[in-house]
Image (tube, rainbow, N blue to C red):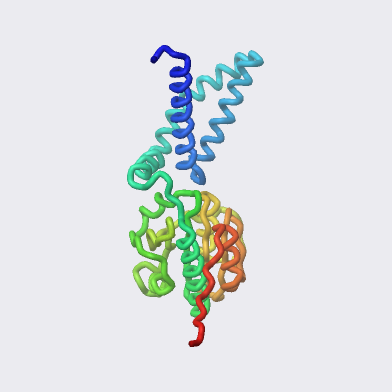
Amino acid sequence: MTDSPVFAVLVSLVDIGVVAYLVYRVLLLIRGTRAQQMLVGLGLMAASFFLARVFDLKTLSWILENFISSFLLVVIVVFQHDIRRGLSRVGRRPLFRVMGLDQAEDLIEEVTTAAEVMAAGRMGALIIIEREGDLGEWAETGIVVDAKISTPLLKQIFTPPGPLHDGAVLIQQGRISAASVFLPLTQVAMEQTLGTRHRAAVGITEELDALAVVVSEERGQIAFVEGGNLTHGLDGAMLRQLLIHHLGHRPKRKRTEVPS
C-alpha cells in the first residue's frame, strides 16, 4: 500500500499541509512586531540573491550569499527574546484564540466611558489595546493585573497618587493585562502642547499593531492613536466610533426598561 501512487499523493498533501500551517502560524506570531519588518528585509534579500543567480551576477551573488549566511545568525541573536516569547505563547494559549463579539463590545463601552469620566475630571490616562501586534513584551515590564475591563477599575488605576497611575494600561484579549507600563517614545516631531503620554501612544503604535487612547490631564481632552496617527480633541461619541471602526464590532445597545 505504501508503494501505491494514491498513498504517495496523500502523504505529499499532508506534508505540504503541515508545512503551510506551520508557516501560517509563524506569520501570525510575528505579524505586527519588529520581526515582521526583519522578515520582509530577508525576503527582499532572498529575491535579490535569486535574481543575481538567474542573471549570473557572480560578484553580487557572492556578496549576498556570504551576507545572508551570517545575517541569519544575527537575526536569531537579536530576536531571541521574540522567539522565546512566541514559543511560550503557543504553549500556553489556544491556537485559535479570538476576541468574542461580547468581549469587544464590553471593551469599547468600558474604555469609552472611562475616557469620558477621566477627561471630565482632568485625570491623565494612557490605554493601549492589542490588535495583531503582541504586547506581551511590554506587559512584562509593568505590573501584572489580569482583570476584567471596567470603568471603575480604569479610573482607580489612573487616580493619583496611586502606585499605578504613572504609566500605561495594556489590554490584551479583552482583559487588562498590565498597568504602570512605560513605552517607547516616538522620535517624530509633535506639537509642544502634547505630552509624554501622547508621544508614548504614537511610539508604541508605530512599532506594533495596537490602538491607543490618551486622556490629557492638562486640557481634559481625549486622543486616539492608530498606526502612529494621532487624532485629538475627541469626545466620547467620536472615540466610540473610532474604536468600532478599528475593532470591527458594534457596541451593545443600552437596555431600556419597559414600564409595566
Counting from the top left corner in percent of width and height, residue 64 is at 55, 22
Taking depth in this image into account, of 34 and 186 the one nearest to the observer is: 34
49 horizontally vs 156: left or right: right
Residue depicted at x 59% and y 63%: 242
On screen, residue 89 above or below 221: above
On screen, residue 55 above or below 99: above
Total tally of numbered discs in the picture: 0
On screen, residue 78 above or below 241: above
Taking depth in this image into account, of 19 and 126 the one nearest to the observer is: 19
Counting from the top left corner in percent of width and height, residue 20 is at 48, 31
Counting from the top left corner in percent of width and height, residue 139 is at 39, 55
Taking depth in this image into account, of 21 and 173 the one nearest to the observer is: 21
Counting from the top left corner in percent of width and height, residue 174 is at 43, 59
On screen, residue 235 above or below 5: below
Q: Quadrant of residue 152?
A: bottom left
Q: Quadrant of the N terminus?
A: top left
227 horizontally vs 153: left or right: right
Q: Residue furthest bottom?
A: 260
Residue depicted at x 43% and y 72%: 151
Residue depicted at x 37% and y 45%: 89
